[in-house]
Every structure is written in structure tokens, then in C-alpha cells.
Image (cartoon, rainbow, N blue to C red):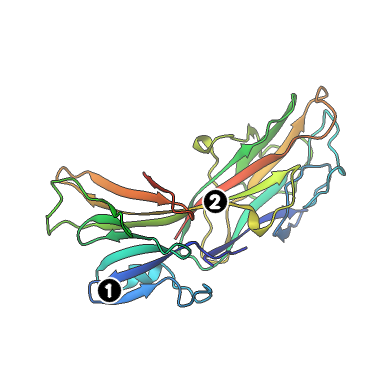
Amino acid sequence: MSATFAWSESNGAIPTVTDGILNVNFGNLDSPNLASPNNRVVAGNNSFEKWNRGKFSGVYTTIDNLKFYKSSGTLPANTSIKAAVNAVYAQPVSTASAVATVDVPTTLGTALVPTAPGASPSYSGYITMQLQTTAAAPPGAIATQTFTLQYDEV
Amino acid sequence: MAQKLGLVWEAKFADGKVIRQFDDAEQISEHLFKELQEYPAKLSIFQLENIHTNRIYQADLEAGKITIFPSPAVYMTPEAEAQGDTTQTYRLIYFRRVRHKVEYAGGNLKDGGIESIYYFIGFQYTDATGQNVKRMIQISDQDEVCIV
């Protein structure tokens, strides 16, 4: 048992929160669980921002020491994934994000630190990400990118 | 989604009280760790047991010792200056480190995308120079042990 974890995504102006999302596929639509190859991002454009959180429920005393980073996957040239944590929610945009402005860390040592959840059930701080491309980005599918959220639990 | 834990804890107090993490093998009825923190008597023994292999990882907070059962027993003790000092106070270290993944352009996740769970058990104390000293091991569900 212990804590029950689910990835969560918020979408829309007044956020619609979807717990238990299945992926964080970036696309040209502000919606969770986008199916590939739909909702493609055209070279030179950005995806809509993703606003994700970890949802913690079930039995736990404390969840802390959260760390978020991209744990595997190589991006093609002229593409990047920008990220930020703990911003106040704002409707996702497909213009260059004013929130997610730094490259998502790719090592645990440089990981972003989302705010820890409170008492069960509760959410972590927001993890905001956006796929950004230039006009020189190559066409075609992007290899799988894996993001990891690590935390300590008692 | 929750899954059954591979290693579950049991705590023994100086007054003989025992609190187990779960009251049942199905891991439905669970005690919060904070019950240990709130119990008035001194915590003497804290141990993790692998539910599949019955291997036990024990932190003895009276003696300041980590022991792994069954034999060959492996144990860690504090530095000589602290050993045998009945005034020494050993404080428990315990947590689970959990990793969940989510993918872009990957497959659909199941069970929250759990990647790994590692268990950390040990103790810490303040040595004669005022330094905080930690003795801790990391354990996997497969009984892989690492001194950290």
C-alpha cells in the first residue's frame, strides 16, 4: 500500500484536472493524453505547455525531497524541452513559455525540486514543460523522452 | 496506483510494545510511521523484512548497530568512541525512495509508471566532537544492499 501515486495534468483557463494521465505527449492542443501522431508540432513552433503534478493519496506520513528530471531520451537538433517548477497555474500557451524557460535537467544532480505535497491526498508543485522547435528542426517522430519524479516517503 | 511493498517495517519499543506496518498480509490495514514518532516509549528496534525472502534488516537503536539476518550476519557499528557509551542516543533513519516515470512519445503508463523503490534504514548519532554521524544502508526489493 503506502502512498498511491498518479501523474496529473491541468488544462484550460479554469483548470480541468486529469489524474492518472498516461503520457505527456507534447502537441498543438491543450489536452491530456495526446495520441501520436496526431496534434503534431510544426517545425518553428512550440507545443502547448504541459502543467503536470504528482498526486499523492493513500497512507503516508511524509513525502519530501522531490526531484524531477529527464532521465532518458535524446532530442533531435533544433528542438528543446523547457521546464520550470512550482509556478502558479496559468492557462497553457503555445507561444514561447514565459514560465518554462530553462532546459529540462537531464541528471538527478541538477534536477528541479517541486514542492512536496501536504497531507494525503495532495499534489506536488506544478511541473511546467514545453517542447520548442526552430524552423530547422527535422521532420518525423521524436524518440521517447522519459521524465522521472523521485521522492522520499515514510 | 499503490502496489504491495516488498519490505515492511516492525518497531519494538523499550516497554515491549510492538507496532507492525501492516496488520495483514494483504497490506490493507496499515499503520502510519508517525505512530512510532508519537508513541511515548523509546524505540529500541526497527527492522524491515522482505516479504518474499524473509530477510531482515535491523537497526538496533540501543546498541547502535545494523544487522542483516539470517546469517551470514552483516552489521555496522559506530566508531569506537561511541561504542559502549550508554549515554549515546541513536536516532532512526528510515525512508523509501521512490521513482516514477512518465514519457513523451512513449508507451502508455501503468501503475503510475513506477521505476524503482529503494529502502533506507540506519541510525545517526552525535559524536564527541559534535559531528552528526550517519550509518545507513540502501536495500532493493531483491535484497541488494548498498552501504551509503
Residue B73 x/y as whole percent: 29, 55
Q: Which mark is residue B40?
A: 1
Q: Are marks 2 and 1 in contact (CB under 8 Å)?
A: no
Residue A75 x/y as whole percent: 71, 30
CA–CA distance in space, label 2 to label 1:
34 Å
Badge 1: few (under 14), some or many (20 or more) residues near its Cα, within 10 Å?
Answer: few
**Can the viewer see residue B98 in this picture?**
no
Vertical relation: A5 (above or below) B21: above
In this picture, residue B2 sits left or right of residue A109: right
Q: Which residue lies furthest to the front in this view?
A: B72
Q: Which residue is drawn at 25% across and 73% down?
A: B41
Q: Which residue lies furthest to the top in this view?
A: A136
In this picture, residue A15 sits left or right of residue B40: right
Q: Label 1 is found on which chain of the structure?
A: B
Closer mark to the observer between disc 2 and disc 1 = 2
Q: In this figure, which residue is indicated by the disc labeled 2?
A: B116
Q: Which residue is drawn at 46% across and 65% down?
A: B51
**Can the viewer see residue A4 in this picture?**
yes
* Amino acid type, label 1: Pro
Write down the quadrant of residue A47 in the picture.
top right
